[in-house]
Image (cartoon, coloured by chain):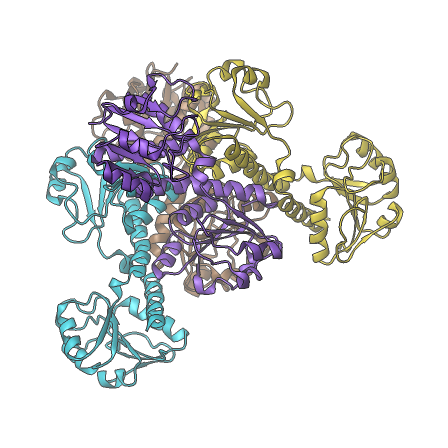
Chain colours: A yellow, B brown, C cyan, D purple
Amino acid sequence: MIKKISVIGGDLRIVKLLEMLAKDEYEICTYGLEKIENINSVKKCKTLQETVQDADIVIGPIPITSDNTNVNAPFSEKIITLNELATNIKGKKIIAGSIKREFYELSNDNKIETIDLLNREELAVLNAISTAEGAIQIAMEETIKTIHNSNVLILGFGRIGKVLAKMLQGVGANVYCEARKNVDLAWIRAYGYIPIHQKEIEKQIDKYDIIMNTIPSMILDKQILKKVSKNCVIIDLASNPGGVDRQEAKKLGIKVIWALSLPGKVAPLTSAEYIKDTIYNIFEEL
Amino acid sequence: MIKKISVIGGDLRIVKLLEMLAKDEYEICTYGLEKIENINSVKKCKTLQETVQDADIVIGPIPITSDNTNVNAPFSEKIITLNELATNIKGKKIIAGSIKREFYELSNDNKIETIDLLNREELAVLNAISTAEGAIQIAMEETIKTIHNSNVLILGFGRIGKVLAKMLQGVGANVYCEARKNVDLAWIRAYGYIPIHQKEIEKQIDKYDIIMNTIPSMILDKQILKKVSKNCVIIDLASNPGGVDRQEAKKLGIKVIWALSLPGKVAPLTSAEYIKDTIYNIFEEL
Amino acid sequence: MIKKISVIGGDLRIVKLLEMLAKDEYEICTYGLEKIENINSVKKCKTLQETVQDADIVIGPIPITSDNTNVNAPFSEKIITLNELATNIKGKKIIAGSIKREFYELSNDNKIETIDLLNREELAVLNAISTAEGAIQIAMEETIKTIHNSNVLILGFGRIGKVLAKMLQGVGANVYCEARKNVDLAWIRAYGYIPIHQKEIEKQIDKYDIIMNTIPSMILDKQILKKVSKNCVIIDLASNPGGVDRQEAKKLGIKVIWALSLPGKVAPLTSAEYIKDTIYNIFEEL
Amino acid sequence: MIKKISVIGGDLRIVKLLEMLAKDEYEICTYGLEKIENINSVKKCKTLQETVQDADIVIGPIPITSDNTNVNAPFSEKIITLNELATNIKGKKIIAGSIKREFYELSNDNKIETIDLLNREELAVLNAISTAEGAIQIAMEETIKTIHNSNVLILGFGRIGKVLAKMLQGVGANVYCEARKNVDLAWIRAYGYIPIHQKEIEKQIDKYDIIMNTIPSMILDKQILKKVSKNCVIIDLASNPGGVDRQEAKKLGIKVIWALSLPGKVAPLTSAEYIKDTIYNIFEEL
């Protein structure tokens, strides 16, 4: 059973997480977080070694690093290298986000068991909630119409598409969902949205006030963009390279907002809660 | 491209399907449906051979047989054996439902390409709509409370569970969804229902006015039933053997309705539409 | 403060109400309910006089009478005249339903304060929930399509129309609401239904699968019925004389269900709860 | 029948309205709008006199004036006094917004028939949609949680309260609605929100993440604010003087956003559509 937790580096979500873990009476030592306000019963340690001593598990940042060399620690002035982290937590378990090859190799060398939060499907679902809400906020800010009674096209009916569709319908939009697979189109009907088969996406594409893309490949290309209304606002939620020919859109005078990493930005507190719930699920499985 | 279709046997859904296919200007010959009213431009043939001649595809009943010997043909006084069917459609394609080993063997012998409608995932999703609505109708009929503001527990968050939850919430129920996997529990939260982990199902199980089961294995066993409210109505939607200890429930005076094959019963016309859409998807893939 | 309550006559809803009042620790005497099962701490009295003695308030049936002469008492073999009731509760307060001129005159003569439950606006709203749910149950039973994705027209956007629209949308219907006033049409838009101005009701009236009427005056007359689809099911929820030319509908082969007094029929337990809540509101105002 | 329309002064909503009116083939002359881009078939007149000549109706700004002296004309460098306007449209009808005593007197003197858009109930309902959506946008911007699964209290169940509740529930909030009247509390139950009687507002008021006020009188006073969570965000939608003791809130460190006139700010295009629809209703009634 987990009792003592080390928390190393991390952003505002990790800080909020600390507060929740402390409330649930875990014994917590932190490192690389010296600039945050003191939290009751959370100890700021002086060395990495001291921090991880006796720890049942280590929690690292999300993402664990943003430069492939050092631990991501915006609330610290210290430089903690991935290497330093790895050698100090030898033989332990670490939960962190977006772990890449470099750290996996270090973990292998040091017999560290790594658990990448972003591989947890339940967290991906929960993050879709924050992403959808962030996308709706952007849509509200960037349009001069209400979302209520607007025609909104969602490209892709995966996690984010599903939650987006539900929320947009909840606000009163006319929700059109694009998908390629018949089974997805059946789900779209079951949920009461208007199904658009990928093959028919170009037809009537001029009628949308808002298009939200969740597909990480070029879907709104030159040819399609030409038919989109000049007043349409496109919100691209797909990770690199996105799904919109942004240059062409610019040329055509169509507004495109490429919105990434929304959960941490629009709802850090909720994100921290979701991370906590996921970590507790991991604890149960250990 | 499909132009000429043979339809052999089948129930009310097949009759409604015939009307729709005729409207879409397919050339249609039927056999084993001689008792239905005449439909414009649908030909009733005298022999099986004549029926299938030149047919681009054959559509059979759902299920194709109910006795493993003869074709399911409630609108006919003829007896058509599976064997007779198979030898007559040699080398052709047949779309039907619930095809079992016997007919697969015959198909193999006669080089028939079989397509089982009930293996089509999109039809399973669409049928979940009818099933859910049928279950709600039963709940309305069998209780002396409104579903609005009732506590309803749904066991299982698969296709039927998902559609049921949405509709019950739409009528105003307090919807609790049971699941085992963390990712399903995350979806339940995302959709705004109250998640119940399978491990905690016994806790507060006395508070439900209605329990709807979709899991085809004994979940409401003796031990759990004892804690269920005597006023609770249980609707079991799971196929054989169901998920409720019906004997124990009877002993305890708890009402259990075991409701199978709802789509064809509560909404044959809608079922026919879904079958048509699925068949058209199949046509596209041929 | 109300402590002692007399309950005289009444149907299943009154029986369920008795159980709830007893649970809330009121002291209760009944008369004209001798055939019901015993309820803990509810006393069955032998005479009307004994029943009402010291009572802080009297609760009568809903409706108080069905023949304008005797108290409505289906769970009794006694005959209790309205006159007998009135003379026995002289100077007291009585809460009952559907009080007509006869009893008002008796009340006046006997200085009885009468409170008609059916004049309570909050009860009318709550009863609209049961009525709407009952109407949906009927629609499910009487059609061979799912309500999901059916075109449903609601005539009138009063209490029942509003709740119906919400629930039907919740089940996935395409909801059209007819109204006459611009402000009602604005509300219909706000709630996300499709507004139909009364003047335009005839246009496209053939497209509806279900029509639900809540307006108590002839709205679906000969001329309009002729344009309604033969497959349409009409559910008339309007009190006498209803809003449908039933003879003409019969001639045309259109199914009409005239559904009255649904709350007591489809959800007597919920009705009893609503009555209890309304009675408690009355207690607060005394 | 209205054919020729004069439009004098007005903000972005009036400009968008002009485009819509032009599309519907009205003959339009404008004055006090010389800085807007040219709109096909909309004539910019040189004098007020020329503008209104032969006009069947005059449309003025919303509000008609912001200083009680001159016509509200942000897209003009001209000064048009109310007096000048009135003498020029003698004997005609004018539709405008927020007409006050000064202009009514001028209208009386000049036999002008005035119609105040803001007295139109249907426009008030439609504007509630934009207001609600604007309030939700603010809530999303000002909190570090998702609205999904947040506890939101709405004070007042009038037009804005009703639309807000529906939308917030649509995004997944736990919606609590405060009201004073039993009938409103019944509606709140019917719609599936959690009713809070005004008398019980203080109880558990610390549990809300967001409080939205629509009541234009001091409801969140010192005493209540003390019990509100420090992390709660209060959005006050009530017109002057609002419903929150803003000084006290500041002292306590509770964030209060006083958000007025949202429709024109967050959704000018939709507002213009609503104004157009209302004007067309007025045309029908003339």
Residue B88 rendering spot, x and y as whole percentages = 36, 20
Residue B146 rendering spot, x and y as whole percentages = 36, 56
* Residue C59 occupies quadrant: bottom left
Q: Is residue C114 above or below residue B5?
A: below
Residue B64, visible in the rendered structure: no
Q: How many numbered marks have been drawn onto this rendered protein structure? A: 0
Residue at x-position 17% and y-position 69%:
C65
Residue at x-position 21% and y-position 77%:
C112
Q: Quadrant of the N terminus of chain D?
A: top left
Residue D73, visible in the rendered structure: yes
Q: Is residue A135 above or below residue D22?
A: below
Q: Is residue C11 above or below residue D126?
A: below
Residue D133 rendering spot, x and y as whole percentages = 46, 40
Return the residue nearer the eye: A210 or B117: A210
Instruction: Describe residue B215's horizontal placement relative to residue D28 as left or right.
Output: right
Q: Quadrant of the C terminus of chain D?
A: top left
Residue at x-position 25% and y-position 74%:
C94
Residue D280 rendering spot, x and y as whole percentages = 27, 32
Return the residue nearer the eye: B40 or A97: A97
